[in-house]
Amino acid sequence: MARNYLKRAIKTATTDAGDVRETVQTILDEIESGGDEAALRYAEKFDRYSGNILLTDEEIAAAEAQVPQRLKDDIAFAHDNVRRFAEVQKQTMHAVDLEVIPGFTLGQKTIPCQSVGCYIPGGRYSHIASAIMTVTTAKVAGCNHIVACSPPAEDVGIAPAIIHAAKLCGADKIMAMGGVQGVAAMTFGLFGLPAADILVGPGNQFVAEAKRILYGRVGIDMIAGPTDSLILADATADAFIVATDLVGQAEHGYNSPVWLVTSDEALANKVIELVPGLIADLPEVNRLSAEAAWRDYAEVILCDDREEMAATSDEYAPEHLTVQADDLDWWLDRLQCYGSLFLGEETTVAFGDKASGTNHVLPTSRSAKYTGGLSVHKYMKIVTWQRSSREASKSVAEATARISRLEGMEGHARTADARLKKYFPDETFELKI
């Protein structure tokens, strides 16, 4: 049986995506040519902030003093989890070497990026967790210089909790600047900062477009769209928990898709019944976002069996994927395309978003088909090396010369010829095909 859509989206995550490229390109061009002064003009225009761009030690200490101890403890708990998981991830990257022929050795090593720019959203929500996720992983990777950049509130500055989290997690500098101008300042090395080798962290469509345009001259974690979440649930799932989890992700924004894929029609109908009431009970700003997301972007899909459910999920390739179904090991083994996987009712996307230790900077808009989320690996360059004795280089040089000439690359061939002539002057080689 084909999938049965009990609720179908009338929009997709790209429906309302405006073309902001021209605007973003203009800002980037003006800041690159105008430097600090141009960035400050845009900061005054968009951030409406006239304080220090780079926070002083005294300003950081004053902000940290405003953070309640219980919140500091929670931030420390989350940071410790993220740090320890990143350390384990780093251990999966090993230096290796292989003697391909006697005397000729190939190797691989990892080198961290030197300078990192971490963008931490402010705006409607103060994304404390984004500071933890981005700065901590860069620190564990061994990056030498980490800038935490976050938009300041008008005439107030960056939220104190973000400042505290960035400092705790290892930021070398904290920059009060948002949007395209913040991304540009990190990329171009303004305000005395080293130019970033890589930019990481979520942001709005302007930040995402700036990263897209700059990619190539600077590395990026990914090009992110609106956050999305999918739940796989069978008859064993609790409809209230499922509905609560869907609403919890729908509050991200009006265009944040949430999807339920299930093999149980009774569960699906109960969830559809429960969601509007749960949304109505949210604070106003959250409620308006969740209402729009549920109305326009949400889907409820009925499948015949778990294999069809898994195939549907892989097609959607969600950023967040939750399984509330029997036989969790089967799902862990079967599922292929997701940013982060949450197995069982006992965990939820919000745990990963905030405190459990996995990273919340994840691929959206079906890009989980080809990439994973932010991790310590994103900051690490995997590079190779080789070394050879003269005797071992002989066979490699012979093959290189012949292949190069077949390709019409005579200059390449002669670099091999020169070594054969120098190292083996008394030997004759057939170096043409």
Image (cartoon, rainbow, N blue to C red):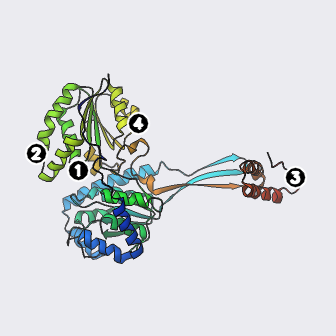
Q: Is 132 on the left or on the right of 380, as rendered?
A: left
Which amino acid, mark 2? Asp
Callout 3: 10 Å neighbours few (<14), some, many (20+)? few
Q: Which residue is mark 4?
A: 336
Q: Secondary structure at mark 3?
A: loop
User: What residue is at 81 percent from the left and 49 percent from the top?
Assistant: 431
Along the polypeptide, which appears first: circle 4 or circle 3? 4
Q: Quadrant of residue 278?
A: top left
Which amino acid, mark 4? Gln
Which amino acid, mark 1? Gly
Q: Secondary structure at mark 4?
A: loop
User: What residue is at 55 percent from the left and 52 percent from the top?
Assistant: 95
User: What residue is at 79 percent from the left and 59 percent from the top?
Assistant: 418
Q: Position of residue 122 (x, y in %)?
A: 25, 61
Depth check, mark 1 against mark 2: the one in front is 1
Along the polypeptide, which appears first: circle 1 or circle 3? 1
Q: Which residue is mark 3?
A: 427
Q: Which residue is mark 2?
A: 281
In the image as oriented, which residue stretches furthest toward the right? 426
Q: Residues under labels 4 and 3: Cα distance?
A: 55 Å
Figure check: 361 above or below 296? below
Q: Residues under labels 2 and 4: Cα distance?
A: 35 Å
Callout 1: 10 Å neighbours few (<14), some, many (20+)? many
Q: Secondary structure at mark 2?
A: loop
User: What residue is at 22 percent from the left and 57 percent from the top?
Assistant: 125
